[in-house]
Structures are given as C-alpha cells and as structure tokens.
Image: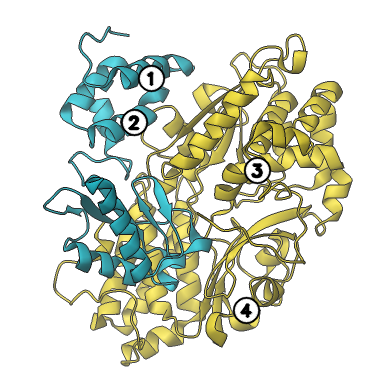
Chain colours: A cyan, B yellow
Amino acid sequence: MAAIQTSIFTPATSARFDKLATIYPVKRSALVPMLLYAQDEIGYVSDAVVAEISQRLDLLELDVRNVLSYYSMLRTVPAGKYNVQVCTNISCMLRGGFELLDHCKNTLGIGHKETTEDGLFSLEEVECIGACCWAPAVQVNYDFHDDLTPAKMDAVLDAYRARETK
Amino acid sequence: MPTLVSHPDEVKVLSRRFGLGAANIDKYLELDGYKATQQAIANGPEWIINTMKASGLRGRGGAGFPTGMKWSFVPKVSEKPKYILVNGDESEPGTCKDHLIFREDPHSIIEGTIIAGLAVGSKMGFIYLRGEYRYLLNIMEKAVADAYARGFLGKNIFGNQGVDFDIITQTGAGAYEVGEESALMESLEGKRGVPRIRPPFPAVVGLYGGPTVINNAETIANAPHILLMGGEAYAKLGTERNGGTRLFGISGHVERPGVYELPMGYSLRKAIYDVAGGIKGGKQLKAVVPGGASCPILKADEIDIGLDFDQMAKAGTMLGSGGIVVLDETVSIVEFALRTIRFYQHESCGWCIPCREGTDWIKKTLTRFHAGGGTKKDIDNVQYIAENMMGRTFCPLGDAAAMPTLGFVKKFRSEFEEYLAGARPADPLIQITPVGEPEHAGAH
C-alpha cells in the first residue's frame, strides 16, 4: 500500500482503514465497507474520499467511482445530518408507507433526495429496508423506526430536533 | 425496535433463543451454545454432511436447494482456499426474518458458519449483511469478537490442534442484486454487484476463485440445531423432502404481523387466519404474495395449500424467502403491480439486456396505465415483455421481475380491463403521474 501521508479522516478512522486493508485475502475487498465508513464520517463520498481510498487500496480512481455509482446508499453530494428514509415497498405501502412519505414531505417541506435549509434533515423514498413485519418503517441514518403513523413520525422527527438543541 | 410475536402453533427450533438475550455469549452458552460445533469437530466432515442431508434442510434464501447436497459438492482437495459465505443481504420485499436472527441469536450464525467450514474443509467464513443492517452488524461484530476471546474462533479452536477458523463480517451498501450469490461474491471482492455466468458453480469456482459454499443466514443458523437434535428428528418436523421448520414473515393486511416459526407444510390459510390473526379490520382477503415480492400472487381461493417448496411449485408459485404479504379487498392490483415493477426496475443491475430493458418498459407502461393513459394492448404488451424476460438472464432477477408481473396480468386481467374502463381505487396509494409529464418513477 502506498503510504498515506496526510489522511482526510480522523486518526481512529484512519487506523481502522489501515487494518481493513489487511484483513481480506484480497485488499480490494475492503472497498465497499471503506466507502460506507468514509461517508459516515465525511457525510458523503467526496472527491477527496475517492482519492484517498483509491490510494489506500491501490486502485484507480475510476475503479472506485465505478463501484461507488452502483450502491444506492453511497452518495456523492452531502445530505442532511439526519437522512430520513421512508420505505414505500409493498409491505410498507399496504400499511401506510406512501402516506408517511407525503407527511414527511409536507412537514419537512422537502422532496425526495432534498435537504432542509438548516441542513438538519434530508428525505429519501427507499426500497425495502427489511422491516416488513413492523411496517410502515423508516430509517433515520442507521436507526430503525417501526410501526409508524404520521403522529408517531412527528415524534420521531421531534426527538432528532431535540438532540440538536441539547 | 421490531417486536417478537408468538403463537401456539409455532415449533421453535431456530427461534428458541429469541427474546432470551442470547446475543450475550454467556447466555448463549447456557442455552446449549457451541455444543454443536464441538460435536462437529469430534465427529468430522462426513458425519456433518450426512446429518445435514438426513435433515432435509433446503436453502432458506428462496431457491430451496438441499443444503447437505450443496456442501457435498465442494471438492475435497483444492489448490485454492475454500470459503464459507453467509448471505445476510436480506432484501426481498416482504422478508425480515434474518433481521431477527442477527439481532436475537448471532452466535447461531457463527456456529453454523464454523460447522459449514468443518464440513467442507474451509478455514475462513464471511458474514455479509445488507448495508441498512448497520445495528445488526454491530451486534454480529461483538458476537464474533466474544467468540475469538473465548477461543471459539481463530487458531486451534476449542483447544483442537490444527483446527482453525476465521470470520470476517461486513455489510453491503444498498443493492438488492447483491443478494444473488454470484453478485454477492463480486461485491465482496470490492466490485459492482453484477452476476457471474454459471457454470462454473461457486462450489467449484467461487470467491477469489476458490471453492465456496454460499448459504442464506437462516440456512446456516439451522445447522447447529440440526446437529444437536439429529437430522432425522429435524426432517420429521416438516413434510416429505421439506425437512424442518421455517421462519415465515407475515406482513401486510393482517391483525398480527410478525415473524413466526412454523413447520414446513403448514397451511397457508391457517398462517394467515390463525397465526397472524386474520385480515386487518375484518375485511376480506383479496390475494397473497406467498414468499417475497418475486413470487407469483395467489388469489383468495388458492390458499388451501401447505407452505413447502413442492406444494407451492405445484400451485404455480414459490415458497421463496418465506415472506407472506397479505392483501385485503381494497388493494388495486394495478397499483400493486406498478409498485412491484418499480422495485425491480430500480434494482436491476443492468448487466443483462432483457432484465434492464424489460423492467424499464414494464414500469413505463404500467406508470402510464396507472395514470389513465392505458390501452388494452398495454396489458398484452406487459405479458409479452415479461414472458420474454423469463430465463434469459445471467441471474434470477429478470425472472423475479417477470414472474410476479405475469401473475398479476394473468390472474387479475379483468381488473386491468376494469381499470381501463374507469374503475379506480377509492383511495389510491400511489401518486398518479399526469400523462405526458416526466414519470414520478418512485423518484429513485
């Protein structure tokens, strides 16, 4: 591996990436998790992220971008601090998923893949998130919220707002 | 957090530790944890594979291939290392069973992975979860770290000289297609998740070119239970050629949705009306998608069948991933068909033309149809396109999109015709895209 002189990541993440590049039989296997963890820290997969990861894994930037464009959770533009992902796939749709999506659009005043002006929330209509028996379900970043109604959704959003004022 | 449910008709084998805190390694050990692995080390590969074969366990991901046979296909001698790959990329709409296994009993997956490794002579396993399951990855990583700390993983496991096994856990980053075994290997190799042509099959040329066993997480988690109770005892719980029990996720319009462990062959009618409490709000049943979104729909008068692979195939559908989605009388099949194809269009990886173009054409046609701009020819066209996708792709995603579509237009053709004539759902679920404007398209 080419030595990383100045990493854009925190020392903890940088150390984690050093290790991640060594555990697989083939170094490139670390690419997908590394992109996801990079996004968790930076907020999106920026050009600088692509550059550093390609260097860490001895790949072309093109290789990294080809993989990056494939996975729906990876984004190349910033999102809100809390990314509200509403599932409208069949099980959620039958129990009010679209109603929930419309409710989020109205209360947040934003559409699909848009971000509120204060940068706190972004909204996304997503495909099945694996919570079908607890539908309708929403993920905010990685947290699951199940069995929702518009009123419960308001409470969920309020709880994230409250985190900010603390 | 997902709630656990229970019903007296359940036969709890795989789920017997659910709700008992078995993610904690000490608790797991109290509940017969890691006994099966030690038995497997003592008795050797032939015993493991024979027991698995006797159990009649068939793959829980959807294809239903006999697990013991799959393991026996791996060559005994190989120049390249052999690998075990646990598919926890659970993404089939209607399916959330592995979610609960990862949360409630992560060590059973570790044990199953080691057992598969012992059976085929592999020293390394990968547990791959879908990207959305980050909190479950954290639970899995803690379980793996605890197993290493106790000497259950790593070198000389359980104090047995020369018996080594390592596990790597990771997630994907959002892609239904990666749940397909060959695309999963591509993703794990750090590539776009596109399928590989077979043959060669993974048992011969798989991950990094080495012989690879790929099993669904539920399949793998069954292995320790089977070794402890014996293959024949497990087989007896189910029906002929469909051994054991299975986690069924019942969702949609039922009173008590949830994941229930029922014997293979259990009545679909009873699963809906007894176990899940019947149709929500006392409404009438319209139809059932019996095994995840890709399985052809069953009408209300077709549910007197048993939930096993063979009975479902006989009824022209599939047991799939065990995700039973229940639709009440209010659901418009036109809307349901549109939402289903939107999913497959979004998830097609674009590698094979029939799937890439077919899902897009069907989605566009149904979007226009739904908006009121349809013609009778559209119904025929949708069927024609779907029929031409079948069997013409590297992986089953093309079939997975075509099969339910064919079910909708064949079984509910009259509903499409009535829609054309102006009959619309009282309460449309999907926003209508005005004809002539860019498609709403689920916005993805």
What's the chain of the residue with tag 2? A
Image quarter of residue A43: top left
Indicate the secondary structure of the residue bearing disc 3: loop
Q: Which residue is mark 4?
A: B278
Indicate the secondary structure of the residue bearing disc 2: helix
Q: Is residue B159 above or below residue B251?
A: above
Task: Assess whether mark 2 and mark 1 are in contact (beta carbons under 8 angstroms).
Answer: yes
| Mark before the other along the chain sequence, 1 or 2 | 1
What's the chain of the residue with tag 4? B
Q: Which residue is mark 3?
A: B21
Q: Is residue B7 left or right of residue B92?
A: right
Direction front: furthest residue:
A166
Q: Quadrant of the C terminus of chain B?
A: bottom left
What's the chain of the residue with tag 1? A
Task: Assess whether mark 1 and mark 4 are in contact (beta carbons under 8 angstroms).
Answer: no
Q: Nearer the viewer, residue B39 or B151?
A: B151
| Residue type at tag 2 | Tyr
Between the residue at mark 2 and the residue at mark 3, the CA separation in whole angstroms equals 28 Å
Q: Position of residue B291 (x, y in %)?
A: 58, 62
Q: Position of residue A142 (x, y in %)?
A: 38, 45
Q: Are marks 1 and 2 on the same chain?
A: yes
Q: Are marks 2 and 3 on the same chain?
A: no
The mark tally for this picture is 4
Dot in front, 1 or 3? 3
| Residue type at tag 4 | Gly
Between the residue at mark 2 and the residue at mark 4, the CA separation in whole angstroms equals 43 Å
Q: Which residue is painted at 29% across and 58% down in the image?
A: A158
Q: Which residue is painted at 26% across and 45% down in the image?
A: A166
The local crowd at label 4, few if under 14, some if 14 to 19, many if 20 or more residues have their Cα within 10 Å, is many
